[in-house]
Amino acid sequence: MRGWLALAGLLAGMAAWSAPASASTEMGCGTVWTLEAQSRLCASRVVIGPGNDTRVNMLLLLRDRAGLPVDGDYPQDDPWYVADLGRTFFDWSRLTRTLYPQPEGDAAGPDNAFGGTRCQSVEQGGAEFLAAADRNRRINARDRARLAAGRAALLAYCQANAGSDSGAAPDGFADMVMPSAFSSDVAREFGIYVAGAASFYAGDWRGAKARFGSLRNAHDPWVREAARYMEARNALGEAAATGMDDWGYFNQSQANDMLTRRSVSELTAYLDAYPAGRYVASARGLLRRARWLQGEGEQQAAAYGVALGRVDAASVQAAELIEEIDDKFLFKPAARQARLDPLLLATMDLLRMRRSSGGEEDDYYGVDYPPPLAAAELDGQQAMFAEQPELYAFLQANHAFYVAQDYRRVLQLLPDDARRTSYSPLQFSRQVLRGMALARLHDRNEVGFWRELLGGASAIYQRPTVELGLALAWERAGQVERVFAEDSPITDLYTRAILLQHSAGPEVLRTVARGEARTGDERDLAAYVLVYRELRRGQYAAARQDMALTPADGPTLRYNPDTYEPQAPVGVYLNGRTSDGYACPALTDTLARLARNARDVQGRLCLGDFFRLNGFDQSELDWARDPGSLGSLASYPGEASPRSRYYADIIIQPGVPREDRAYALYRAIHCYAPSGNNTCGGEEVEESQRAAWFRRLKNEFGNTRWGQEADYYW
């Protein structure tokens, strides 16, 4: 069965993906297949560096500090998305799904239905409430049933109104605070708690405060603590609500300062009263948000440093904390003056080594970059990294590589350590950066370094990263054939596919198509690219001969119609469309004709129709790759001819049969239908020339089929 792996990267431009809208990530675009990354890029690497999503850098550093590798299984993503990223790159979502997989059927987490609203805790809080009521033997069965009904009504209210503020508690809950509502004072206190929760979820801050505040001396210990916590949470909710405008947008600077201070006081009071309480972790997070509302960068920084030290790096809470830091702190001006934990400082330093345009693009994406990091400032941070000298040397090496472009200093800062059996995230990043410096220096030992590093690159995303470094080295040296040698250590199908599509010459393509390639897909891809290149370059005899390498049952579409997976349409040469009006034979017959005479008029018109009918115009195989990226050093000989050139030549060629010249004019005009843009490749033709073609077709060839069918020019 033909899959899509060997087609990785084919149609990569169409496989562009959209990263989450965040200051740390990028908008939709394609992946640049290179190890170097100083500017904002669409995808991150397992190599810690300036161009990564700041959340990725933070998480890799956190796991490194905890002694955890980057492990897990590659997530099952949309195949077009994977074709762009391969097994070398990822975005934040993909990395967190790799490291913290959710149970099947629960990929979005238990509270997803109310995510982003106050109601996100309604289900878990309800379960805790009912468990506490069941534990209290002073609550009889009838009262427990009424309390359960109240929680059910509260859940129904959230399902109908989550995210909206009525400013008044929903109907029916006020009855639960009445003395006659329950058989005992204990049960009534639980009822008051339910009514307070209803007020909170509805945005009735005063009502919630009054009800939760009345429970400070409640009989049940769970009610006392939970009410105290909710009173503090309510205070923060009220403070945050003052920053919302009439359109629902939040402006931090508009939040009421007095209410914000009160929320800090309430949260601190809960933590003081219950230092080992049920809601300590949540209260600490809320307190960080309150500090954010206050704009207190120094206190935020201290709180985040403590939180990073407490969080279990192996838990999904680590990723959630990092998202909070990235959104609420890292890109804010307050973070730039605060004293940062070494992990946060390293993340900030790398961010400040990032190259930004500093212009309209950054404004458009909402990026608020801190000022660039000067070497003297980095030198002054040595004491802050006194207990982490390898991390500090790595930061210095990044500055030397990306900012100072002093590649020899990189080698001095990062000694060769390419013979380990495994690497932590930081150890691996140090060695890859060293390899990048060797590449910049054109060091003769670069290939040997990458080959040695492969031995310990065992964690997820690591081996494909090293293989990319080795493939780039061989491509720069003009030795692409080594990637496809029988004993090649480069096994990553995505890396191999990009080189087949963009850098491999005819001998490499022919060898892969004929030989024992890694997969049948790879053979198909090599054959598809080989014949395509030959057709475009007028190598008609070779193309006809090499069509024997294409399978008779190969696919003709660029995607599987059942699964929508991309695939190499290698069967198009034998089974593709050849005509939709102008009489044309099979492609093999057209090529035989052109092999005898490359200027054969009908042969060129039929080849043009083959290109048009099978989607060969402006093929991604002819798109320029980013300079320095994998596949950017094309080595295929000859010049590719667009089909527009066939028509232009036939229009002015002497002795062309009348019907054929009319068809050439018709097709040349339709290269610009319907948008006025050239879809046939080659240089643009002025509208005045297209108008002249149209007039000639109507005046000189008006009685031909093509003259009669032409109604417009574009």
Image: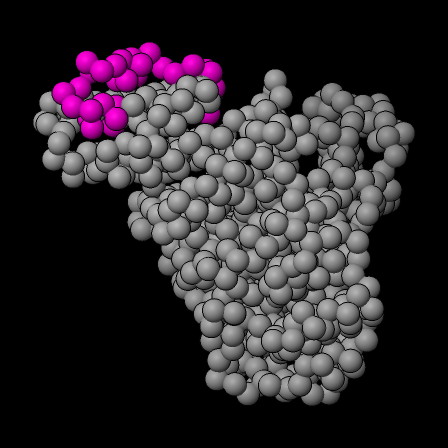
Name the image colouring. Answer: one colour
Q: Give the range drawn in magenta.
A: 163-191
**Residue 714 visible within the image:** yes
Which residue is drawn at the image coordinates 31% and 36% (left, top)?
224
| Residue at 25% over, 14% down | 178
Q: In this view, does 559 lie above or below 240?
A: below
Image quadrant assignment for residue 31: bottom right
Q: Residue 353's x, y, as percent?
A: 75, 61
State whether residue 524 appears in this view.
no
Could you tell whether 467 is left or right of 478 in the image? Answer: left
Q: How many labels does the image show?
A: 0
Which quarter of the image is occupied by the C terminus? Answer: top right
Residue 73 image offset from top left, x and y in percent: 40, 62
Q: In which quarter of the image is the N terminus?
A: bottom left
Which residue: 49% across, 30% down?
Answer: 235
Q: Position of residue 358 (x, y in %)?
A: 82, 47
Which residue shows up at 33% across the image and 46% down it? 278
Residue 618 on the magenta segment: no
In this orientation, which residue lies closer to the viewer: 247 or 443?
Answer: 247
Asked whether, in this view, residue 523 is left or right of residue 121, the answer is: right
Q: Between 518 and 32, which is closer to the camera in this rendering?
A: 32
Horizontal arrangement in the rendering, residue 319 relative to residue 365 (left or right): left
Q: In this view, does 64 lie above or below 58?
A: below
> In this orientation, which residue lies closer to the viewer: 487 or 702?
487
Q: Specify the quadrant of the image occupied by residue 578.
A: top right
Q: Which of 588 and 441 is in front in this view?
A: 441
Position of 713 with respect to 99 (left or right) is right
What is the x, y in percent for residue 695? 85, 25
